[in-house]
Image (cartoon, rainbow, N blue to C red):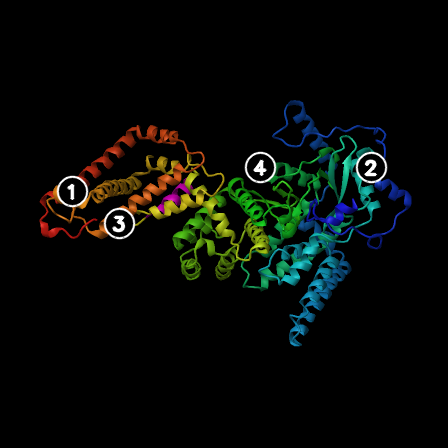
Amino acid sequence: MMSFVAAGSQCFCSSSLALGPRPTSASRPKTRRAREARAALVEARPPPAPARVIRPAVRDANLIVGGDRTEDLQAEARAMARAVNASVYSPEVLAVQYGSRPIKVLRRTLEILTGLGSFGLKLLLDKRNGVFDQKKGIRAAELRRIFTRLGPTFVKLGQGLSTRPDICPPEYLEELAELQDALPTFPDAEAFSCIERELGLPLDSIFSSISPSPIAAASLGQVYKAQLAYSGQTVAVKVQRPGIEEAIGLDFYLIRGLGFFINKYVDIITSDVVALIDEFARRVYQELNYVQEGQNARRFKKLYADREDILVPDIFWDYTSGKVLTMEWVDGVKLNEQDAIERQGLKVLDLVNTGIQCSLRQLLEYGYFHADPHPGNLLATPEGKLAFLDFGMMSETPEEARFAIIGHVVHMVNRDYEAMARDYYALDFLSRDVDVSPIVPALRNFFDDALNYTVSELNFKTLVNGLGAVFYQYPFNVPAYYALILRSLTVLEGLALYADPNFKVLAASYPYFAKRLLTDPNPYLRDALIELLFKDGRFRWNRLENLLVQGSKDRDFSANDALQPVLKLLLGPDGEQLQILVIKEAVRVTEAVVIGTVVDTYNSIPNVVRALIFNANVAGPLTVSDSEIDSMMALRDQVFRIWGLLRSSQDFDPALLQPILQVLQQPEARSLGERVIGGITQRLAARLLQQVLRAPTTVSTSIS
């Protein structure tokens, strides 16, 4: 066990937990020798049979069948019964609880103001004395100690700051990162008593062995490594800190009061600060119910652990309650430990990209996402998988908002600021009665500069800050889910910046957006794709090529699905206007292919033969200018490249054309096809007539 802890190369992280220094006897109260002996529970022989044998139920709902499924549901129901008295956030209850305790409230207020005020004063003095940079390391350590002393609420604040290299200097990042690792522990005797009290069983009937001290400690609890008496399976046992509800309840009561003050007197902040505080508080209180966390983990695994590069641990319901969580042990390295990860032959950026792709699926497909992906909750396993841990803080993206976010990206790329402004209705940033026209110039002023960069150069933080400046000027109300989305993506970008200072989360995300636009049949996204591909009555083949190039980088991209949604819309009852554009484009492409073939054939003929065939007319057979030929050749080559991209897809099958052919057999499609053929015939006939009637002097140039 000592070598395991000292190595720091393996850890289980839950509720901001990560492997930290083993607590010394000085860091926790001494307990009786008998209690320590019971805590070890490491025996040379198997333990006696427990009074009540509990067979752990199978956890993964995808693997549960028949009786196992029934047993699993029964085990979960028993866990829920044990957590029936779990606390739920209620600002009214907190107001009653602490409104009548002014002395306690005043004492806590002074404690917070003293800690943070003294720190701020020291920073001012350092700046005045010209030693601000020299004392960064000292002040960072002081801030970490202040956050630790102020308790769980401020520990969580510090954890968030530790993943933001764009906000905090390196000295602060290094110190605040310890808030994910080396937090003070509470006595083991209290933890073991809590396990027995919550589960209603003696400790030695549950575990054949358990670490004599916690292997990790965090803001809400601490974790022990144990082996189940029933199966010998290694598990992580998280036990909640005693008195945690009292501590965070008082802090949220005070913070909520500050929120009312900000709403009333701080005009620059237009969001409902109290609503944001209430949403965050509800999330934290949910973290206090470990049965809820187990249910979150099960739902998350069912939705996202189908990918071979994602790992989600199982929950042992029979050994879980409101204050005790028993889950599968995960060996791995924290995602910000770059050297340790590379020693295993893995790359941090590959893992971060896996996290980004999974997070995008969370945010924009099912809408159920992990809202606290800091380094302590993301592990790189020896097999190269990304393990998600700590499912206490989860959130959901409303369905309408999921598609609006993707559409918003399309409108941003198109610089369609009027449509961007209207997106804020669907995103629930603005009420429908707000006129968005005054917002358009502000969006244009910011994005015209930002979009001078390529997608690969755009920084997520830059866009967030720019939108934030717009939000401050107008009556935006940022929903809580959006704040958590920003937190999730900025944390992932922050993790990547440890490995690559030039990393851009938007560039890593673009393949996913491209894939969704090309393959998703949702009407909102079909309209967004058409809006992206057509402009001023012309089809933008370069946009389609770029979407296919980017979309093919997404491992879930399927050529079989690409463009099928557009085809269905094209042939649908509402596709008349689009059909007109497609007919024109089909004619243009066909002409480009035919003319291009003629040009290639002409250029392949030796000069002597050309002279004989065309009566020594070196200008060639076509009355087409060089610029027009170049344009048609470029169009033809681009169409061929696009077809090549589709064919190069791993799942390419010529049978993918079959659905298209089936659709083309429908009356509406036959009519469309006839119109295309008619347009092509007229265009080529006009070209031929021009060739027949041309005068030699009208020939502009050679095509060779």
Q: Earlier in the sequence, mark 2 or mark 3?
A: 2
Disc 3 target residue = 631
Residue 321 is left or right of residue 547, and the answer is right
Inspect this view and state whether residue 7 appears: yes
Q: Residue furthest front?
A: 608
Residue 89 appears left or right of 231: left
Name the residue tied to disc 2: 203
Prevailing secondary structure of the magenta residues? helix
Residue 627: percent from left, percent from top: 23, 52
The answer to which quarter of the image holds residue 106 is: bottom right
Q: CA distance from mark 2 to mark 3?
A: 79 Å
Identified at 58% across, 48% down, the residue is: 347
Q: Which residues are magenta?
A: 522-534
Specify whether residue 527 is painted magenta: yes
For disc 4, the neighbor class at 10 Å (few under 14, some 14 to 19, many from 20) is few
Q: CA distance from mark 1 to mark 2?
A: 97 Å
> Are dots 4 and 1 in contact, CB under 8 Å?
no
Question: Relative to 111, is 297 on the left or the right?
Answer: left
Q: Which residue is the site of mark 1?
A: 609
